[in-house]
Structure formats: structure tokens, C-alpha cells
Image (cartoon, grey):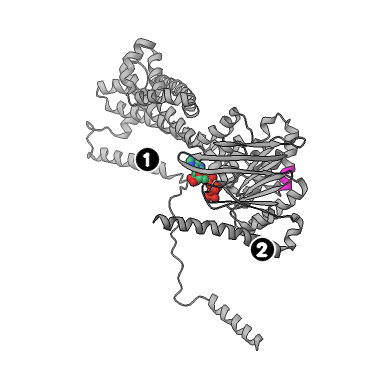
């Protein structure tokens, strides 16, 4: 399934947040979005998932969702968004309950996604008993339970420490290799962006416009071995962003 | 050479970990601001106050005309039990309180949810609630007597109205405070409106609703006594009024003690409910 954003502009009150953003996420592609803080990345993702109406332009989906997909466009949130009063299994169950799945099959799905995320032992734990990394794995398990076609991830790893981040990153790559989901991945971390992205969309500072799109034509599986090339790409993306920041600085000193 | 250097370094490190003579523990500053359950403290405080009071009365420091001794009040309570009047008064009061409070809470939660969920209800009902909340409901008792009769109806209605308003305010405040991200999460997974309300909004508002119960229950007891003082033959309020009219201070204290026990019992019940419903909060 593809996600197509066409000429999206958005404003909150008097401030222009997004301006004329167009790009597409192809079948089984991970597109990373990077940009300075406050440039509208989260807003863009909310628009892409139908949680917010864009001021102009439209978000489209094309193609058929895979067989049995309960929620084609599925989010993974930065703050995990787990219900604190439900257990791990209960949190996964929540997103299945509205689909009229019989109890036995629902249990099977929950068991399956929890074992795929190594959480089987914690099925009956409450979120407050889990570490940050485990909470995010619960959120990933919950997303997997509805068989998404396109994952919308808003800085899913940024609340975690760097070791946990590495481990979850590997999990994500392994998962993608198995399921080939499409994804829109917002991040602050350029290393994550070059590790996961088929393309990196670099946004300018607010109002967010597409500053550049960097293509990375290298299979995900090969990336850990070709770190030098990735490093170069990462530096290139950083150059673009730094220029952006410099221009912002210059504008401020002009005003002063 | 290098080996030697390494070994001296290692020795140095060992020395570092051994405590120098002036070492002292880092002062602990992390205590406080969390609650432990101290079971026997509450009864000890109660008993100490009553013992002091009794001792004061026996010693003649507290005049029996000003305040009868606890033992006398206990005697009055004993009389109530032996004559069988205790259950008549207590039963009547609990019935009014229970019915009025339960109905008021149910209607209050429903209206509070509506105010929390629907813009129209908020625009239409909230000013009304704000206008009626500060009115002492007991002032409306004559009106309720005309509407609902001199019997149970008017008393239950007074308590119902008294419970209703704080419950509405607690409930809609709780709904407003539910984490918007959780609601957005529910929407992003395509949960139905009813599911979001039932599984996300109501549990999220539950802490606020339960603390609203504590307030509304106290208000309900105050209104119960007031209503029973104005027009009732049975009930703890009527008993206290009678005792006051006869200057039977021991009976008056006995009646007040009954009210306290009622309040304690209710607080205990709500505490149980909180532990059962909010166990997820740690
Ligand atoms: N609901 C809202 N109402 C008004 N303004 C908003 C709202 N949401 C976001 N904004 C504003 O829009 C701008 C973009 O916000 P957004 O959260 O999309 O940025 P972001 O790129 O995700 O930032 P960050 O990298 O810090 O997460 C910000 O200036 C923010 O103040
Ligand atoms: Mg953001």
C-alpha cells in the first residue's frame, strides 16, 4: 500500500506550519522525515494518518491493504500511549476488541505478537512496571496486532537510552525484513534516518518545506557493513540541516 | 615496564575505593511526600482524645453542663440500642442517604460525562451547573416539600441535588484531564466512539470521579442532618434535634458520634473502591 501526500499546507492560527509538502511512500518503503524542532513533522504525520485535516492539499492512500489488515495506517507514538490501567496483554487486546474477533483467535494474536516482541513473560504486567524500552516494544506489539500496511512512527525511539535504541532499531530492521511494511519515520537522529530510510525527506525550519530528498539505494541488510558510506550520507544530511540553522541565525541577527 | 605501570595503576585504583578516614555517608534527602499505611495510628489518636476528655470530665475540669463525659454519651448510645431506636434512626438515615447519594451520583456522572464530551451540553449545561452549585440546597427544602411531599421524597431530593452538582464538576474535570494522546491513540487504531469513552475516557476520569465521591458524600451527610432537623420524626438528625431541644447533651453527643461513624464508614468504603478501581496507579 502507498501513501501519497499532495501539496500539504497547514497553519495553526496565524503561524504557517507546513507549506506545500508533496512526497510518496511506496510499497514496502521506509521514508524518514528529519527537520529542525518545531518545523511541523508531528503535524505532517498526524495529517498523513487522518488524525488532522490539512489546511490545503490532501493525503491519499493507493493500493490494497494486505489480507487481514485491521488498521492499514497505524501509529507508533513517541510517548508509547499505553493505557496505564490495562496490562500488556490488555493494551494489545484493546485494538482488537472492536473488530468482532472471537476470543480464542484474539488470544492467539496477542500471544503471537507478544512472543515476536519478546514480551510473553510480561503479558500480565502493568505499564508502570515496565522499562521504557519494554513499553515501546508493547506499543510495537500492539501495532503488529492489527497487521498494518503503513506504519507512522513519530520519534519512536527518542525517549529511550542509546543501548535500548540500538536493540530496538535492530528489531525494527528484522521486522521490516520479514513483513515489508511501508513506513513514515520521523526522527531527530540522523544515524537512525540513514540506517532505516530508503529516502530521507529533509524539511526546512518552520514553515516546514521540503528542503531536499536524499535517496539511499542500499538494501537495509547491507547497511551495517557499509557504515563508511552511511557516514558520508549522514554528514551530507547534516550539512543541509546546518545550513538551515545558519540561515535561521542570520535572519534573527538581521531583525535585531 | 608497561606491566609494572599497569600493576601500580591497579594498586592505585584499589586505594581509591578504600574509604579515606573522613568519609561519611551521603546525607539522605529523598524521604517524605509518599504515604505509608500506618494502620494503628488513627485508632490511637481517637482513643487518646476520648481518654483525655473522659479524664477531664472525671477530674471536674470539664463541667458536665458544658460537655458530658464520653461515658455518659456511651450510656445514651446504650439506651438507643436497648430501646431498639438505634436501628430505626440509623436505618431511616442510611436509607435516605443511600438513595439520595446513589441517584445523585448516577445522574451527576451521566451529566458530567455529557458536559465533558459534547460541546452542546457544555455550552448549555455548564452555566446552569455553575449557577445552581453554590445555592445551599437546604434552602430549597420547602420547595422540595411542596414538590415531593413532606415524607421521604423531599429529603432524598435534597441529598440528590446536593450530591449531583459536585459530581458533575468532578466528572467533567476528570474527562477534561484525560491524556489527549491516549484518545488520539484510540482514534488512530480506529476504535469506535463508544469504545473510546468506555475504555479510555471513563477509566481515565475515574480518579477524579472517586475523589469527587469523597466530597459529595460529606455534603450528603450534612444535608441529611439538616433535612431531618426540619421535617422528620426518625433519623439521626431528628434524634439530635430532639436531644438539643431537651438539653440532653449526652444524647446529642451520642447522635453526633453516630454521624462521625457514618462518615468514617463511607470514607472506608470509598477507600476500598479506590484501591479496587485504581490499583493501576501504584
Ligand atoms: N494543536 C496545535 N495548536 C497550535 N499550534 C500547534 C499545535 N500543534 C503544533 N503546533 C505548532 O506547530 C508547530 C509544529 O509543531 P510540530 O509538533 O508538528 O513540530 P515537530 O516538527 O514535530 O517538532 P519536534 O521536532 O519538536 O517534535 C510548532 O510551532 C507548534 O507550536
Ligand atoms: Mg514532534
Side of B254 where B10 appears, left or right: right
Q: Name the front one of labels 2 and 1.
A: 2
Which element is circle 2 on?
Answer: helix
Q: Please name the predominant secondary structure of the magenta segment in the image.
A: helix
| B205 to A237, vertically: above or below | above
What is the number of the mark on residue A249?
none
In the image shown, does B227 or B261 lie closer to the viewer? B227
Examine the rendering and report whether any part of residue B236 can be seen: no
Range of residues picked out in magenta? A112-117
Badge 2 vs badge 1, beta-carbon distance below 8 Å: no
Side of A57 where B215 appears, left or right: left
What is the number of the mark on residue B46?
1
At 67% across and 38% down in the image, what residue appears? Answer: A73
Which element is circle 1 on?
Answer: helix
Task: Look at the image and tell me in which quarter the N terminus of chain A lies.
Answer: top right
Side of B98 where B224 appears, left or right: left
Residue A252 % position (x, y): 43, 56
| B110 to A225, vertically: above or below | above
- Residue A113 belongs to magenta span: yes
| Subunit bearing disc 2 | A
At 34% across and 20% down in the image, what residue appears? Answer: B227
Amino acid at each position: 500500500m502507498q501513501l501519497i501526500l499532495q501539496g500539504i499546507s497547514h497553519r495553526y492560527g496565524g503561524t504557517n506550519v507546513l507549506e506545500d509538502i508533496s512526497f510518496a511512500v511506496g510499497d514496502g518503503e521506509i521514508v524518514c522525515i528529519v527537520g529542525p524542532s518545531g518545523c511541523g513533522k508531528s503535524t505532517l504525520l498526524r495529517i498523513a494518518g487522518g488524525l488532522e485535516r490539512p489546511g490545503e492539499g490532501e493525503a491519499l492512500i493507493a493500493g490494497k491493504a494486505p489480507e487481514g489488515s485491521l488498521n492499514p495506517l497505524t501509529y507508533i507514538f513517541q510517548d508509547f500511549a499505553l493505557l496505564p490501567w490495562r496490562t500488556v496483554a490488555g493494551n494489545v487486546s484493546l485494538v482488537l476488541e472492536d473488530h468482532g474477533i472471537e476470543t480464542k483467535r484474539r488470544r492467539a494474536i496477542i500471544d503471537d505478537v507478544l512472543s515476536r516482541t519478546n514480551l510473553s513473560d510480561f503479558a500480565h504486567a502493568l505499564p508502570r512496571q515496565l522499562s521504557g524500552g519494554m513499553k515501546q516494544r508493547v506499543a510495537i506489539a500492539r501495532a503488529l496486532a492489527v497487521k498494518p500496511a503503513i506504519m507512522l512512527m513519530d520519534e519512536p525511539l527518542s525517549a529511550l537510552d542509546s543501548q535500548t535504541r540500538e536493540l530496538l532499531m535492530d528489531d525494527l530492521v528484522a521486522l521490516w525484513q520479514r513483513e515489508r511494511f511501508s513506513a513514515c519515520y520521523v526522527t531527530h537522529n540522523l544515524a537512525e534516518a540513514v540506517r532505516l530510510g530508503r529516502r530521507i525527506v529533509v524539511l526546512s525550519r518552520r514553515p516546514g518545506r521540503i528542503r531536499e530528498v536524499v535517496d539511499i539505494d542500499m538494501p537495509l541488510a547491507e547497511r551495517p557493513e557499509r557504515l563508511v558510506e552511511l557516514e558520508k550520507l549522514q554528514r551530507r544530511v547534516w550539512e543541509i540541516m546546518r545550513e538551515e540553522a545558519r540561515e535561521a541565525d542570520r535572519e534573527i541577527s538581521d531583525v535585531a | 615496564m608497561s606491566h609494572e605501570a599497569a600493576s601500580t595503576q591497579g594498586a592505585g585504583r584499589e586505594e581509591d575505593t578504600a574509604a579515606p578516614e573522613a568519609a561519611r555517608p551521603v546525607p539522605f534527602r529523598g524521604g517524605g511526600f509518599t504515604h505509608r499505611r500506618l494502620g494503628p495510628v488513627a485508632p490511637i489518636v481517637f482513643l487518646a482524645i476520648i481518654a483525655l476528655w473522659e479524664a477531664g470530665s472525671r477530674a471536674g475540669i470539664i463541667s458536665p453542663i458544658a460537655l458530658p463525659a464520653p461515658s455518659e454519651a456511651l450510656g445514651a448510645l446504650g439506651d438507643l440500642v436497648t430501646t431498639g431506636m438505634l436501628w430505626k434512626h440509623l436505618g431511616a438515615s442510611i436509607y435516605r442517604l443511600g438513595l439520595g447519594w446513589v441517584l445523585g451520583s448516577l445522574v451527576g456522572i451521566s451529566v458530567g460525562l455529557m458536559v465533558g464530551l459534547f460541546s452542546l451540553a457544555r455550552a448549555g449545561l455548564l452555566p446552569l451547573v455553575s449557577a445552581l452549585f453554590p445555592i445551599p440546597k437546604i434552602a430549597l427544602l420547602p420547595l422540595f416539600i411542596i414538590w415531593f411531599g413532606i415524607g421521604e421524597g423531599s429529603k432524598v431530593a435534597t441529598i440528590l441535588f446536593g450530591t449531583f452538582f459536585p459530581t458533575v464538576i468532578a466528572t467533567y474535570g476528570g474527562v477534561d484531564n484525560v491524556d489527549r494522546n491516549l484518545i488520539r491513540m484510540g482514534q488512530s487504531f480506529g476504535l469506535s466512539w463508544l469504545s473510546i469513552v468506555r475504555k479510555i475516557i471513563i477509566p481515565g476520569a475515574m480518579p477524579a470521579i472517586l475523589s469527587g465521591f469523597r466530597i459529595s458524600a460529606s455534603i450528603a451527610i450534612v444535608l441529611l442532618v439538616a433535612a431531618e432537623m426540619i421535617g422528620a420524626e426518625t433519623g439521626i438528625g431528628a434524634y439530635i434535634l430532639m436531644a438539643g431541644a431537651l438539653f440532653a447533651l449526652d444524647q446529642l453527643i451520642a447522635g453526633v458520634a453516630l454521624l462521625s461513624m457514618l462518615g468514617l464508614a463511607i470514607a472506608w468504603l470509598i477507600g476500598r473502591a479506590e484501591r479496587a478501581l485504581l490499583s493501576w496507579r501504584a
